[in-house]
């Protein structure tokens, strides 16, 4: 194994996360003669893999059609189309399975290790790197990068109190959302798209959802500005979460950031019901003679709306029986059910998965090789790029795919 003090390398990868490891392993397995080094500034590698998916690591998603897969990426989908024809979720499953890591698919399509333990994934990556003789240097922070006269790169590295220089023919940034590394990338001539959070929950304080934390509705449509998302919605202590809200937050990441997370959310608690269809059901409830003396709040008129939520949505009808409800009230209730408006007052954190959008401008990268179109010999992979997916394993898949492609090219 080459010594870290040896100042010359064939390939240096900055960042020991999912993308960096995948690239290093692929390059080393393709070309065992290469001297490959991963520089990781933290005291351990794969920190995000370990905490991901609530400690279970949602490795990828059971979506095997590239055309469909790209629709889960608010940013980067178009660029990933070709990339996914070369390495996609099936290949991820195969990659781990060939290393004795079995994965399982949950009913919503998310894929996890059967052990339900992210250590399984991290250990597999570390073992594979070790076997392929990839050198990993921990606590080594890259502070600056310059070009050498021979067309390679010179790195300024700091480890503990020691500063030193390394040289490499090819260099890859797999530095995730690290701001300082992005500044280094800028010094090399690349454009960085400003980072803003993606995948967050909405802070909403509203009497209609007060006291309902933990309650979820299976099929809800939510809208913000011109954006729409559909799926389960979860009421939380602070507002709203669940797949529908997280999807909307990813697609609306930039708009909501620009609006300082103060916007109006429209909620259709009935999935895709139109106002007229809801009104018809409500009218039938009113007309049904047995209902005439029954309180409106006592039973939900729609099986998909739990009674506790129904009671709060019909608050303005008070103690009235169905027989006494006016036409205007029915109209208002139909509106409440299909297009209720809620003020978003801020964003909350989604603890299971947190990503930023923004990063290296995708126009400046060749997605066949992940090589820079600006600096020869410079490569990118993972979250350092302006790519982000919705929740469900798509962000790791982008890291595996771009890492694998970069690894291929680095080994060439
Ligand atoms: C709590 C949480 C849970 C998540 N769960 C999931 C999930 O279940 N499924 C999913 O698909 N996605 C999940 N994600 C998103 C996913 O973790 C990321 O998309 C993925 O880790 C990106 O991998 P990466 O290799 O590009 O970057 P990272 O994993 O961020 O790795 C970058 C590495 O580079 C190092 N580095 C940066 N700059 C330097 C430097 N100058 N010198 C040396 N080292 C440097 C960093 O220390 C870091 O280790 C989750 C994210 C979080 C925060």
Image (cartoon, grey):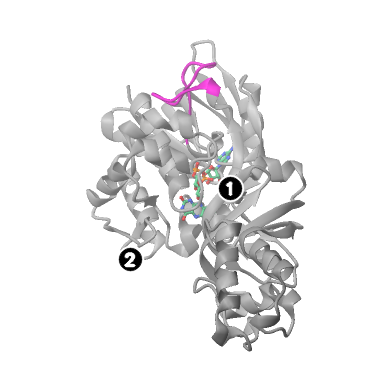
Location of residue 26 (image quadrant) = top left
User: Picture coordinates of residue 321 (x, y %)?
Assistant: 67, 84
First in sequence: mark 2 vs mark 1: 2
Magenta stretch contains residue 104: no
- Residue 272: x and y, percent? 52, 56
Q: Is residue 88 above or below residue 224?
A: above
Instruction: State whether residue 167 is above or below residue 395.
Output: above
Q: Is residue 323 above or below residue 173?
A: below
Q: Residue at x 68, y 44 (%)?
A: 225
Q: Foreground residue, 80 or 139? A: 80
Distance from mark 1 CB to nearest ligand 1 atom below 8 Å: no
Q: Would residue 309 appear left or right of 370 to someone viewing this image?
A: right
In contact (CB < 8 Å): disc 2 and disc 1: no
Instruction: Tell me the CA gap for discs 2 and 1.
Output: 35 Å
The residue carrying pointer 2 sits among few (fewer than 14), some (14 to 19) or many (20 or more) residues within 10 Å by Cα, namely some
Which residue is labeled 1 in the image? Answer: 228
Q: Nearer the viewer, residue 159 or 93?
A: 93
Q: Is residue 169 left or right of residue 187?
A: left
Q: Nearer the viewer, mark 2 or mark 1?
A: 1
Mark 2, secondary structure of its residue = loop
In the rendered image, the quadrant that contains the N terminus is: top left
Q: Which mark is residue 115?
A: 2
Rendered position, 255 above or below 302: above
The question of residue 368 being in magenta is answered with yes
User: How many numbered marks does the figure carry?
Assistant: 2
Density class for disc 1 (Cα within 10 Å; few <14, some 14-19, many ≥20) is some
Q: Residues in magenta? A: 363-381
The residue shown at (61%, 50%) is 249
State the SS at label 1: strand
């Amino acid at each position: 194994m080459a010594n870290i003090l040896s100042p010359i390398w064939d390939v240096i990868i900055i960042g020991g996360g999912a993308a960096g490891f995948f690239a290093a392993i692929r390059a080393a397995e393709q070309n065992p003669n290469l001297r490959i080094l991963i520089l990781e500034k933290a005291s351990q590698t794969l920190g995000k893999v370990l905490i991901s998916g609530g400690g279970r690591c949602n490795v990828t998603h059971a979506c095997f059609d590239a055309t469909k897969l790209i629709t889960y990426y608010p940013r980067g989908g178009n660029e990933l189309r070709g990339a996914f024809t070369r390495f996609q979720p099936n290949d991820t499953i195969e990659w781990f399975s060939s290393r004795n890591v079995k994965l399982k698919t949950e009913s919503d399509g998310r894929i996890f290790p059967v052990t339900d333990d992210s250590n399984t994934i991290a250990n597999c990556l570390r073992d594979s790197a070790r076997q392929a003789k990839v050198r990993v240097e921990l606590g080594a922070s890259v502070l600056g990068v310059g070009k050498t006269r021979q067309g390679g790169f010179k790195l300024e590295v700091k480890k503990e109190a020691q500063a030193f220089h390394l040289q490499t023919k090819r260099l890859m940034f797999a530095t995730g959302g690290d701001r300082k590394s992005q500044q280094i990338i800028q010094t090399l001539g690349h454009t960085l798209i400003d980072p803003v959070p993606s995948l967050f929950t909405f802070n909403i304080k509203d009497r209609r959802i007060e006291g309902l934390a933990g309650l979820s509705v299976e099929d809800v449509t939510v809208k913000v500005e011109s954006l729409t998302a559909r799926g389960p919605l979860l009421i939380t202590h602070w507002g709203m979460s669940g797949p529908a809200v997280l999807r909307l937050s990813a697609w609306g990441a930039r708009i909501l950031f620009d609006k300082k997370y103060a916007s109006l959310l429209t909620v259709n608690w009935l999935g895709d019901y139109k106002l007229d269809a809801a009104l018809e059901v409500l009218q039938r409830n009113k007309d049904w003679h047995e209902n005439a003396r029954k309180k409106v709040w006592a039973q939900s008129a729609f099986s998909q709306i739990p009674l506790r939520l129904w009671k709060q949505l019909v608050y303005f009808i008070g103690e009235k029986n169905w027989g006494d409800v006016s036409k205007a009230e029915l109209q208002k209730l139909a509106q409440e059910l299909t297009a209720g408006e809620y003020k978003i007052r801020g964003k909350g954190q989604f603890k299971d998965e947190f990503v930023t959008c923004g990063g290296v401008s995708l126009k400046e990268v060749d997605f066949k090789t992940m090589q820079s179109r600006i600096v020869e010999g410079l490569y990118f992979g993972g979250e350092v790029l302006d790519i982000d997916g919705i929740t469900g394993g798509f962000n790791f898949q982008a890291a595996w795919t771009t890492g694998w492609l970069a690894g291929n090219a680095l080994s060439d």
